[in-house]
Amino acid sequence: MNFPAELKYTKDHEWIKVEGDHAVIGITEFAQRELGDIVYVDINTVGSEVAEGEVFGTIEAVKTVSDLFMPIKGSVIEVNANLDANPELVNSDPYGEGWMVKISLAEGTEGLLSADDYKSLIGA
């Protein structure tokens, strides 16, 4: 499994990549493997400020639907429109083309996990 060191991670299996005062958020490779084949991503929080730990959308796999939790407080400024037609991008490229949302940061990333801490959490 891949654990990019430049990303931060959550216990809920989201990743976050900070780019100045914005960030990109998605789910980890571990999460997408656990879910199986992704068939639909539903995110309708564009323009909304979402608190850390709140649900910002859902992801549907063949056998289950899971909530997506905001790893850090911020305002959703963009949803990955490519997921509408190609939700399988989450399976094939979770850290690249399979990203979920871009946010405007409202706080720092101090409470997030490093790649090594996340690997320990999932026993990798």
Image: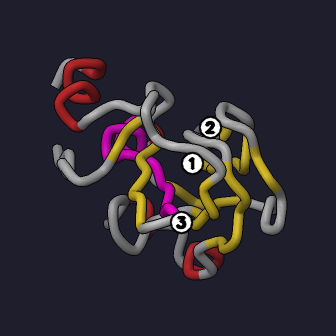
Nearer the N terminus, badge 1 or badge 3? Answer: 3
Residue 29 forms part of the magenta stretch: yes
Q: What is the x, y in percent for residue 79?
A: 65, 71
Residue at 80% x, 59% y is: 45
Q: Amino acid at mark 1?
A: Ala
Question: For the residue marked with disc 2, what is the amino acid?
Answer: Thr
Q: Residues within 10 Å of mark 3 (few under 14, many from 20)?
A: some
x and y percentages locating residue 40 in the rendered image: 64, 61
Q: Which residue is mark 3?
A: 22
Q: Is residue 66 above or below residue 92?
A: above
* Crowd band around label 2 with a 10 angstrom C-alpha radius: few (<14), some (14–19), many (20+): few
- Residue 6 lies in quadrant: bottom left
Percent position of residue 37, x then y: 46, 53
Q: Which residue is mark 1?
A: 61
Q: Residue at x 28, y 22 (%)?
A: 122
Q: Position of residue 13 (x, y in %)?
A: 44, 35
Local SS, label 2: loop
Q: CA distance from mark 3 to mark 2?
A: 30 Å
Which numbered tag is attached to residue 120? none
Q: Nearer the viewer, mark 1 or mark 3?
A: 3
> For residue 10, which quarter of the picture?
top left
Compared across the picture, whether 76 is left or right of 62 comes to right
| Dot 3 amino acid type | His
Question: Of helix, strand and loop, which one carries label 1?
Answer: strand
Q: Pointer 1: residues within 10 angstroms few (<14), some, or many (20+)?
A: some
Upstream in sequence: badge 3 or badge 2: 3
Which residue is tagged 2?
A: 64
Q: Quadrant of residue 54?
A: top right
Cα–Cα span, label 2 and label 1: 5 Å
Boundaries of the magenta span: 22-34
